[in-house]
Amino acid sequence: MAIQTSIANQKPDIEQIILVITKPMIGEICHQVIFSYGDELRLDFGEMSAYTHPKLAHLRKGSWQFGTRATPWVFKQGDRILTSSLPVDIDAEIDEVEIDAVKKVLQQLENKELIDFVIYARNISLTLVFEGDYKLILEPDLPDDSGLAYWELFMPTEQVLTVGPGFFWECKSIHERY
């Protein structure tokens, strides 16, 4: 059974629900930072295991997988910006050198403990706080009409939490059809 709602109709409070859903993730270690589907950032937390599909068996995934979608983000240590998401230009080729440089900076999150996971309902921004005063801040572009989710969290319970577009969110089984 899926839980879904529009954040604009906040019944119950999205900040509290996200806190409850993500609480088991707090204290997990970020083991892997990668880019998937071009510039979509993915962080793998918790126990790492091989994919079950034979063609992906050489790859590993975390029991918790956090992925950005069509969402600008900033990576900071303290008040200092270390890097940010790549500019989106649909007609331009993604520069592999630039992606590699950004990935290298983001890899500072690997082997770091997740300290907090905070969503702000008023603008759907999200801050992941890590040991060492590192922060990954997602700042969704609410007027964006791409229809893509801002971010997703795949959980070891075989559920996925999806936030966006707009003030929409849902938590459902990964086995449910759309």
Image (tube, rainbow, N blue to C red):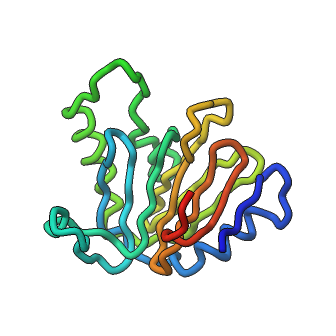
Residue 57 lies, in percent from the top left, at 17, 69
Residue 117 falls left or right of residue 80 = right
Residue at image position (48%, 76%) is 158
Residue 114 vs 106, above or below: the answer is: below
Q: Nearer the viewer, residue 87 or 55?
A: 55
Q: Nearer the viewer, residue 10 or 16?
A: 10
Residue at image position (77%, 53%) is 7
Looking at the rendered image, the quarter that the N terminus falls into is: bottom right
Residue 70 vs 35, above or below: the answer is: above
Q: Quadrant of residue 140?
A: top right
Residue at image position (81%, 64%) is 13
Residue 158 falls left or right of residue 95 = right
Residue 125 vs 162, above or below: the answer is: above
Q: Residue furthest top?
A: 91
Q: Residue furthest front?
A: 177
Residue 143 falls left or right of residue 27 = right
